[in-house]
Image (tube, rainbow, N blue to C red):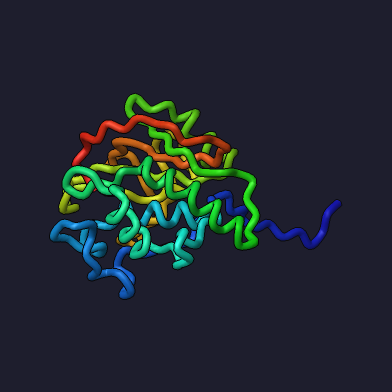
Amino acid sequence: YFDNVTVTEIDNSVQVPYLSQDDERWKIAKYDSIDETIGGVGCAVTSAAMVLQYHGLSKLPDGNELNPLTLNNWLTAHSGYGLSGGVVFPNIAVLSKKIVSYMSSNGSSFDFEALVFKEHNPPFNYQSIDNIISNLKHPLIFKEVKSESPTGVYFDVATEMIESGVHYKVADPKNPSRIDFLQPPDQLTSVRYFQPSNTNLSSLLLQTDNDL
């Protein structure tokens, strides 16, 4: 028989480095070229920065640290925002290829050439979504309905599936104490995903979304 057995809870979450859009280093920084701040409406760009850092993309091609402020500045300068300040997520995929090239030339090692942007929309295939987060161990960016948000929508990073289609652990860029997405009352409207790949990133983008 076994004696002195200690049972501990296994953490199955994706270990995403947490970033807050309310960090004093960028909270009041201008968001895109519109009359908003990162602290006010920067949930999407902050979520994207968390995902990029998770994949080891910690420097921009100019050598600056990648964080919500520098990512925001890069997107502003490279057509990375669309209508009304909405993040053009495929442009972040293009940036990822440049980062991999830059960091590789400076001694870093990657097993992918770029992150390819993919999007899941309703009706959701939760089996596919859950496989990404539970088996591939890649974070997802959730877009939710959020009435208290200035734009009516909100982005955060899903790090673990607890109950398929219902309960997920999240890293909330605005509220660090919120760690659970529960549906309902939370309402998922899309799932964004950056997939490590070896690709030329050829794509066609039709920008019609006006969310942030």
Up the image or down, 69 lies above or below 155; here it is below
**Rendered position, 67 above or below 43:** below
- What is the number of callouts on the image? 0
Quadrant in which residue 173 is drawn: bottom left
Which residue: 37% across, 40% down?
90
Q: Which quarter of the figure has residue 106?
A: bottom right
* Position of 207 relative to 178 (above/below): above
Q: Position of residue 84 (x, y in %)?
A: 16, 47
Q: Is residue 58 above or below residue 163?
A: below
Q: Position of residue 179 (x, y in %)?
A: 40, 55
What is the residue that sits farthest to the right in this orientation? Answer: 1
Do we see residue 84 in this rendering? yes
Where does the image place residue 165, in percent across and percent down from the top left? 41, 34
Residue situated in front as seen by the camera: 49 or 80? 80
Identify which residue, 11 or 63, lies in the foreground. Answer: 63
Q: Residue at x 54, y 51 (%)?
A: 13
Q: Is residue 192 left or right of residue 38?
A: right
Q: Position of residue 208 (x, y in %)?
A: 21, 34
Q: Residue at x 41, y 42 (%)?
A: 167
Residue at 72% x, 60% y is 6
Q: Would residue 140 appear left or right of 46 to someone viewing this image? A: right
Q: Residue furthest bottom?
A: 24
**In the displayed structure, does residue 141 sit left or right of residue 42?**
right
Can you see residue 176? no
Q: Nearer the viewer, residue 26 or 206?
A: 206
